[in-house]
Amino acid sequence: MTTDTTTQDATPDATAPRETVLDARGVTMRFGGLTAVRGVDLTVNSGEIVGLIGPNGAGKTTFFNCLTGLYIPTEGEVRYKGKVLPPKSFKVTAAGIARTFQNIRLFANMTVLENVLVGRHTRTKEGLWSALLRGPGFHRAEAASRARAMELLEFVGLAHKAEHLSRNLPYGEQRKLEIARALASEPGLLLLDEPTAGMNPQETRATEELVFAIRDMGIAVLVIEHDMRFIMNLCDRVAVLVQGEKLIEGDSATVQRDERVVAAYLGEPFEGAPGDEEAAEVEQAEAHAQAQAETEEEAAAEAQAESAETTTDAAPGKENDR
Ligand SMILES: Nc1ncnc2c1ncn2[C@@H]1O[C@H](COP(=O)(O)OP(=O)(O)OP(=O)(O)O)[C@@H](O)[C@H]1O
């Protein structure tokens, strides 16, 4: 009976009305003369896993940084559950958005458990005096935090390593720990920046299951990833960024079929693609260089054949010695 209730509570009701968790409108980010993100709109609703893909340098991480207060967008607005987000990352975390980083950012000399406890600080109500005096309130809060941190480690499969130093974990487990730490702030939206980078296929598969489980806990997910199979299996919706602009957004099948997306990934220019002319110039130069190299090779082969004819009495094995 108890188990049934828990399962039902954890699984989002597909018929329940969707709430807009994240609403980014016209987000633009310029660095001097470079526009890394241009006028991007994106929403994430409760119960959704949304993918953000695009070639290297497309602006995905910059967009994430605009959502999490690391960057203040040059233009545009980001709302979380209807409220405009404050331009400070710790306030964004307190509001309910947590993230992981492309380059893992753990406290290497802290234990696995301590890393998760750090992630709980935005949810700990005990103030400075309580912490200094270490009164009963502090001890109660600390015990509750540790219990929750252990639950989260259990959830990601790292409870047995709670007392290990985080720097001693294999790479795949460090990524899991980053996720546990992000979950420790009890977010309503989790942003994952390349969660499977450097993972083997089994670890990637396990991460897929983990993200589904996070969604089933009632947390909406926005994920950047280069592994297409992972994205297509996982996401309800996928948005594609190319050179800072949103090229297309749709379900996995629609995005996968779109020839502009295929072209952007394979590096093939599509009609009207930004940088078309430059790509054509590079192609032309490469073709020219190759033709020249072939002509030189032919000339060298001819010269070699001629010299072989004039030295017919060369000792056996001479050819190999050269
Ligand atoms: N702080 C910064 N200052 C100047 N330029 C930046 C800064 N951050 C990013 N850029 C530039 O903005 C563009 C987008 O970079 P970004 O890292 O957001 O792309 P990305 O899609 O996340 O790439 P990748 O998939 O390789 O991680 C790049 O041209 C990058 O060099």
Image: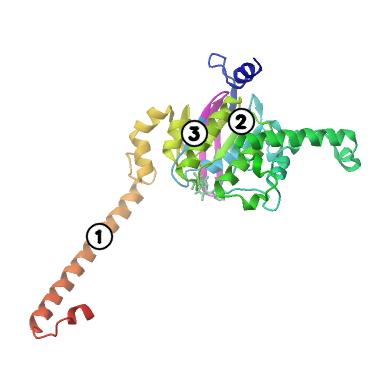
Q: Is residue 48 magenta?
A: yes
- On residue 189, the disc is 2
Q: CA distance from mark 1 to mark 3?
A: 40 Å
Do the residues under discs 1 and 3 have CB atoms within 8 angstroms? no
Residue highlighted by disc 3: 51
Residue at image location 50% in from the left, 46% down from the top: 197
x, y percent for residue 124: 78, 34
Q: Name which of mark 1 and mark 2 comes first in the sequence.
A: 2
Mark 3 is on which residue type? Answer: Gly
Q: Nearer the viewer, mark 1 or mark 3?
A: 3
**Which contiguous range is marked in magenta?**
24-49
Local packing at callout 3 (Cα closer than 10 Å; few below 14, some 14-19, many 20+) is many
Q: Visible in this render: residue 69?
A: no
Residue 294 lies, with reference to residue 170, above or below; the image says below
Residue at image location 17% in from the left, 81% down from the top: 317
x, y percent for residue 319: 18, 79
Do the residues under discs 3 and 2 have CB atoms within 8 angstroms? no
x, y percent for residue 233: 44, 31
Residue highlighted by disc 1: 288
Mark 2 is on which residue type? Answer: Leu
